[in-house]
Amino acid sequence: MAFFDWNQAILNIPDTWRATEGKGVRIAILDSGANLNNPTLQHLDVPGHKFNVARPDYSLNAALSATGGNDNVTDQLSFGEMHGTACLSVLAGKPESSTAGVKGVAPQAEIFIIKIMDSAAMYRKGFVLDAIELALKKNVDIISCAILPSFNGSYTDGRRDVIFKALRDSNTALITTLDNTTMANTLTNLRFPSDQPDALATGVAQLPVLNSNPSPDQLFARIGFLMPPVKVGSFRVMAPDKYPTANISSSFTTTALAGIAALAMSQAQQRMNKAALMSLFQQTFNQPFDALSMLQQTAPAYYHK
């Protein structure tokens, strides 16, 4: 088994942030679920922290009850992979030893796993609204959503506006994803929830240089998410004995950036909304917010307004 440390692998993070490992920060991750029997993720199998808003009998009141937060959140195949398990390992994996497993960016953060995929492997906008509403009720500091649902479900514009007003009022940071693309129209053709002005959206240009898939022992010692050029491969965990590589994707960039935000909040010991985070990132990483110009560089990862 290999060992990989996302906390150390990402370039440019101040050591004072890195050392916090996100302790004291509460993060809700909205995804396809998680395989919590994996040694890297077993520490996240916490009573009161597992919710499935996509099940037919879901209700907010039941979720917030004394017995809530103990749902079955077992991951399902999504786009041919266990998407939630992979993203969660990047965000908050914590292996049993320093010789085997995947350590996430913020392994000490308090994680709320919110499954937004139904039994038919569908993501719906209504599930996202349910999940954001629940996360706000749980008083999280960060919501990470690396999913772009294609169907409405119980979504309405009116309900969206109410919940996003609550998001703004809470100062909770919503970090979302873009499609992988080399097309500049990604910047004007965002899909929910990345199309909302309150979302800090991340993405990565899917360039041919990313097509290589090195074996785990050939992975780069450092992976630069926040400043180009991005390295070729990314690393995540899906099974106890399997650590597949994958092309850098906006999903992993999203959860990595959510982890970095947790490091910053933990070090500052305060919550930061989108505006505060973007200001801090620009100051710390000296990264412009002109995503169009960054698309023209070699395999850049970017975040934008």
Image (spheres, helix red, strand yellow):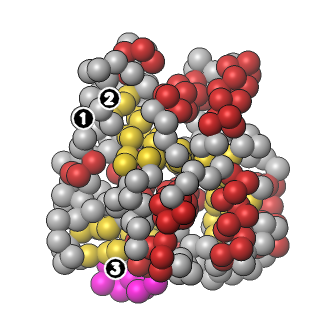
Q: CA distance from mark 3 to mark 1?
A: 36 Å
The picture places residue 198, in percent across and down from the top left corner, at 72, 43
The picture places residue 8, in percent across and down from the top left corner, at 41, 78
| Residue occupying the far front of the picture | 269
SS state under label 1:
loop
Residue 218 among magenta residues: yes
SS state under label 3:
loop
Q: Nearer the viewer, residue 214 or 38?
A: 38
Helix, strand or loop: magenta stretch: loop
Query: In this figure, which residue is indicated by the disc labeled 2?
Result: 69
Q: Are marks 3 and 1 in contact (CB under 8 Å)?
A: no
Identity of the residue drawn at 39% across and 82% down: 219
First in sequence: mark 1 or mark 2?
1
Q: Which residues are magenta?
A: 216-223
Other residues around mark 2 within 10 Å, as few (<14) / some (14–19) / many (≥20): many
Say what amino acid the circle numbered 1 marks.
Pro
Q: CA distance from mark 1 to mark 2?
A: 6 Å
Looking at the image, is 10 positioned above or below residue 63? Answer: below
In terms of image quadrants, where is residue 101? bottom left
Identity of the residue drawn at 78% across and 47% down: 189
The picture places residue 194, in percent across and down from the top left corner, at 68, 45
Looking at the image, is 297 positioned above or below residue 56? Answer: below
Query: In this figure, which residue is indicated by the disc labeled 1?
Result: 47
Image quarter in which the C terminus is found: bottom right
First in sequence: mark 3 or mark 1?
1
Say what amino acid the circle numbered 2 marks.
Gly
